[in-house]
Image (spheres, helix red, strand yellow):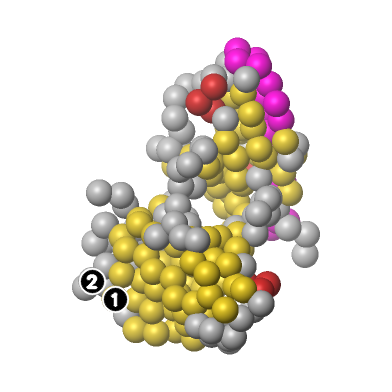
Amino acid sequence: QKEVEQNSGPLSVPEGAIASLNCTYSDRVSQSFFWYRQYSGKSPELIMSIYSNGDKEDGRFTAQLNKASQYVSLLIRDSQPSDSATYLCAVNRGAGSYQLTFGKGTKLSVIP
Amino acid sequence: EAGVTQFPSHSVIEKGQTVTLRCDPISGHDNLYWYRRVMGKEIKFLLHFVKESKQDESGMPNNRFLAERTGGTYSTLKVQPAELEDSGVYFCASSRAQGAGSPLHFGNGTRLTVT
């Protein structure tokens, strides 16, 4: 079983729609969870972090965490073509180090 | 604030040669990390420096890889001798501290191709 699993996509959504990206993880003691956006040839860019169960909203982005189900998701409302990128889910076991475990990423395409 | 910078952006070397990758973290960031992504795989942790000290090098694949951070500023990652399976993108990242409020910033990576 992979440690962090994501659907590789591509996930295609029309402009203005909600994009839903999902991630599951295997390590039950994971404490912190991150979503990174990566454009081709560029650095991963942190867009959301979440540490406790429930929803966390930041602008058009909402991260959802369910530790019992070992599931974390990212919703992007009013998707824009500029949101087209690969979205990486990353999980951290503890608080002492950013030894992140990444998923392979989901490629999102927002169709104008 | 300047971001994490990595040199070179691309490197093509032959099997058996040596390559040195460099990372300049964001100024004031004591924590520096190396990660890499080999073709078709996920990004994986290699090691973590706190200032000039290696905090965790559990992700280093073998003794052909040597990371240094003399003076606690920039870091180098040397691969000697390089093998075909070392090809991939090597990312450096830095953070001021750990935990919420101190995010991890990544560089654009060095794409290494070993032929």
Report if the CB atoms under discs 1 and 2 are less than 8 Å apart: yes
Span of residues in magenta: B11-29
> Can you identify the residue that label 1 sits on?
A66
Q: Secondary structure at mark 2?
A: loop
Subunit of mark 2? A
Q: Quadrant of residue A83?
A: bottom right
What residue type is disc 2 on?
Ser
**A89 sits left or right of B23 in the view:** left
Residue at 57 percent of width and 36 percent of height? B88
**Residue A72 at what x, y percent from top left?**
36, 71
The span from disc 1 to disc 2 (Cα, nearest Å) is 6 Å
Farthest right residue?
A: B2
Subunit of mark 1? A
- Residue B26, magenta (yes or no): yes
**Residue A20 at what x, y percent from top left?**
44, 76
**A44 sits left or right of A4 in the view:** right
Local crowd at mark 2 within 10 Å, few (<14), some, or many (≥20)? few
